[in-house]
Amino acid sequence: MMANLTRDHDYVRSAIDDCFSGVDTMPSLRSDIMRKVRGEVKLKKKLSAGFVLVIVLVLIAVTALAIVSLTQTAQLMAQTEKEDGDFAYWPVETKVKVIRELNTEGYIETDDQLRKLASGNISLEEADSLADAIIENFTYEEARYVSFLVIMTSAWGEFDTWTTEQKAWYSEIVLDAGISEIGDHTIYTLPNGEVSEAEALEVARQAMMQVYEIDDSTLDAYDILVTFEIPEFVSDGQSYWAITFEAPADMSEEERQFELRTIYVHPDTGKLYQSVESMMATETTITQSGNEIFTAIRELSAKTDSGEFRHWPLELKAEFSEIVSPLVRAVMDSGDLAPLISGGGVQIGVMAQSTYTYGLPTADDISQEQALSLAKQALNQQYDIGLDVLELYEEISVYYDVTNPDQPLWKFLFNPKSLHELEAGDPLKSICYKVEMDARTGEIALLDEFSWQWLGQDYDYDVKWY
């Protein structure tokens, strides 16, 4: 295996060497290539196949020289995700760098697709499409849903199996890139303090056994995960040992004393952040509510291949408003958001999606196609955006809002990260546009423009997308 991998790497490098044997003596060509790599000049579709091959290969060559390990591409991946969204929307040179490093470290095998990317006579558009196909084969996810974390878990395994050092490294990367902040998500750090992992685990075990009145053997039947983290509900940046006890899927109802419980132990004092009794007192109805919400969301998600909520068909959004939104609003009204915690933090997106009520258009309404055409005309007139440019948006989220049943609204959100045909650095690629209109008359009710930022961090911002 390693011999084959080495041979294939030599094959790629040889192709690169052959292709660039004369570039050093042609400064103007070298300068032109690098300007295109940096995105300073938009590449036209009519470039010759040979010249495009040169560009693709220089990206791979530069990557081979500049990147030593996958962990060193992490900052690039995280920053690109912050700026451009998921993998499908990354610049082609970044995609090639990541794939090249995954190949170099043995996570992606050299196959016909990779050879074609490295040495085939393909356009940049084809290279971009091929990179997406390679990453989809690697992650088993569509490229538009492949994030930095998806790439890393595909390489290193499920996040829960990572070492303490790997988790702390990941959190440091996402903090530096601005993807996450303390107080928004769980942040993993390297252990410190007077209390060791073994001592913290024993404190948690004793607390659980005392409250549930069980012995060691009963608790040993549970899966136990220990992390060192700043929990999402802590605002002062204090880290804790987090010990999670979870019932295995095959545990019988008779054996099951509880489903899941996380105990937080202070690393200096050994005291619990919150007693087990206190958690039990407040979580009886909360756990039921939380399970109901996320179970319903999973069931609705299974009905579509459209991925994120904003891509769902109108019929499914209407079902969401009927089934999920009332449960979420009840939790929000209670002031205790614990039922909405999942995946290490409060699901702000679910809250935003539940803010408005969605339904289905009637015969009294203008059609979705008519409404979208009017929305584009309004943006053209208000913000002087060319109609030809408005046709370049590959993602325009659509909603039929019946929050006020007497005045239903068509809503459209133009996602700037789907403007793949525009040059890097074009200001339109950082601005979201929102249009709302009376669904019956077509009269514009709202025109809004606002800067793009990462979703899931700020409820007030996320609501603008719905």
Image: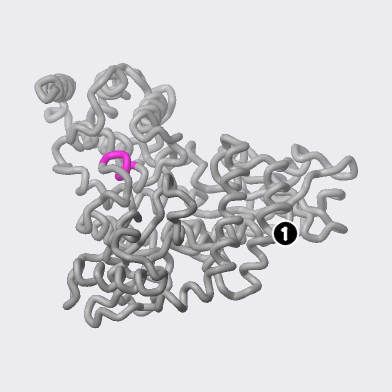
Task: Return the residue nearer the eye: 183 or 398.
Answer: 183
Range of magenta residues? 151-155
Quadrant location of the C terminus in the rendered image: bottom right
Task: Return the residue nearer the eye: 71 or 223.
Answer: 223
For the point 28% across and 57% down, the residue is 173
Task: Return the residue nearer the eye: 423 or 156.
Answer: 156
Quadrant location of the N terminus in the rendered image: top left
**Relative to 225, is 28 on the left or the right?**
left
Which of the 4 image quarters holds residue 116?
A: top left
Return the x and y of residue 24 as percentages of the image width and height: 12, 30
Return the x and y of residue 399 as percentages of the image width and height: 70, 48
* Residue that carries the numbered disc 1 in the rendered image: 446
Return the x and y of residue 85 as percentages of the image width and height: 44, 48
Return the x and y of residue 16 as percentages of the image width and height: 17, 24
In this picture the colour scheme is one colour
Q: Secondary structure at mark 1?
A: strand
Q: Amino acid at mark 1?
A: Leu
For the point 20% across and 48% down, the residue is 72
Does the magenta segment cover residue 24? no
Density class for disc 1 (Cα within 10 Å; few <14, some 14-19, many ≥20) is: few
For the point 30% across and 74% down, the residue is 265
Above or below, 214 relative to 350: below
Q: Is residue 257 visible?
A: yes
Above or below, 458 relative to 62: below
**Relative to 74, is 385 on the left or the right?**
right
